[in-house]
Amino acid sequence: MAARPTAHVTEGMTPRSTRIITCANHKGGTGKTTTAINVSAGLAVLTQQRVLLIDCDPRGHASLALGIDRQHVRYSVTDLLMGAKPEVQALCWDPRANLHILPANATLADVERDFVRRGDGRLQLQQALHPLLDAFDVMVIDTPPTLGLWTQAPLVASTDLLIPVDMGYFAFTGMCQLLDALARLRQEVPLTLATPHILLTKYDARTRLSTHVRALLRERGDAAALQTVIRVNVALARAQMARQSIFAYDRTSTGAQDYQHVIEELLGHRRAVEASGTVSPFRTQRRGPGGLKEPKSGRAAQADAR
């Protein structure tokens, strides 16, 4: 692939306020891509922030889930890593939603070996994203279910790590492996990552297993479990089939409610609760006396069958 004009990047990364959230787990099928899509879409829709969803999985599932033709894109993650300086408007997926996407395709797997051979391969994504920081308030990165380069490079570039974990034992093991790999990475590369957050997915409050796993996750000292959980919800799967985020597909579903709470909790606006009413327009927190009050908890809702 021919490299486009290279953007100049200085050796030292200058301070910036752009928040970069990586969604990762060594185990597949935990809701990682679903979380990356809906957190990025929710941030764009509910907060009107400028959001860039970056697909770092060579399979391109995040791109596919939003209807992107991965074989005919103007810019991909591979282009960015090869020196291209994407035009922000060319990344615009839905102008009404304020959401932009940098998709991935199989070419990302083709160049992985070359970047692994480079001593600074894990730093390349951080450097490539640097010219785009002023254009976006938040970047959300989806990763493959591996501990390889396309997980390590996003971790180096990120300020936050969100680990979706479902009810299975292997998902918990995958999380532990990821946290162990992160600890080793911290010894080798300077990181700006805050304490990782764990997001429990496919949660069913009617089962003892869900309650047990939730309590188990809160015992870990190297990561903080979010109060919010993603309940079992058919609408999330149907949204993927419709090539839409849950906020575009059904903003009244429990899936939309839960992901709104994830966003609010990540932004520090409130302590999210397990159940709530229908999704309402996002309200920013006011500072000082008279600020936004803690909302009351609603009754635990049944899993949405829609």
Image (cartoon, helix red, strand yellow):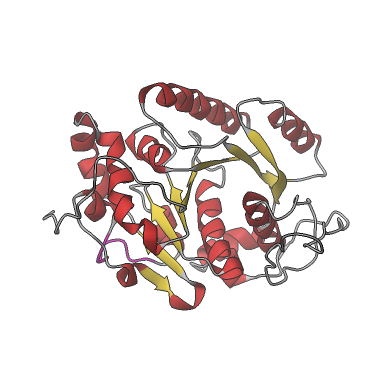
Q: Is residue 194 magenta?
A: no
Vertical placement of residue 294 versus 26, above or below: below
Q: Is residue 252 above or below residue 260?
A: below
In which quadrant is the C terminus drawn?
Answer: bottom right
Residue 125 occupies which quadrant of the picture? top left
Instruction: Give the x, y percent position of residue 289.
Output: 81, 61
**Where residue 115 appears, x then y in whole percent?**
22, 36
Q: Residue furthest front?
A: 288
x 36%, y 28%: residue? 189
Asked if residue 149 shows in the view, the reply is yes
- The magenta segment is 68-75
On screen, residue 176 versus residue 77, left or right, reads: right
Can residue 73 be found in the magenta stretch?
yes
Q: Residue at x 48, y 67 (%)?
A: 243
Furthest toward the left, the residue is 2
Residue 12's quadrant in the figure?
Answer: top left
Rendered image quadrant of residue 157: top left
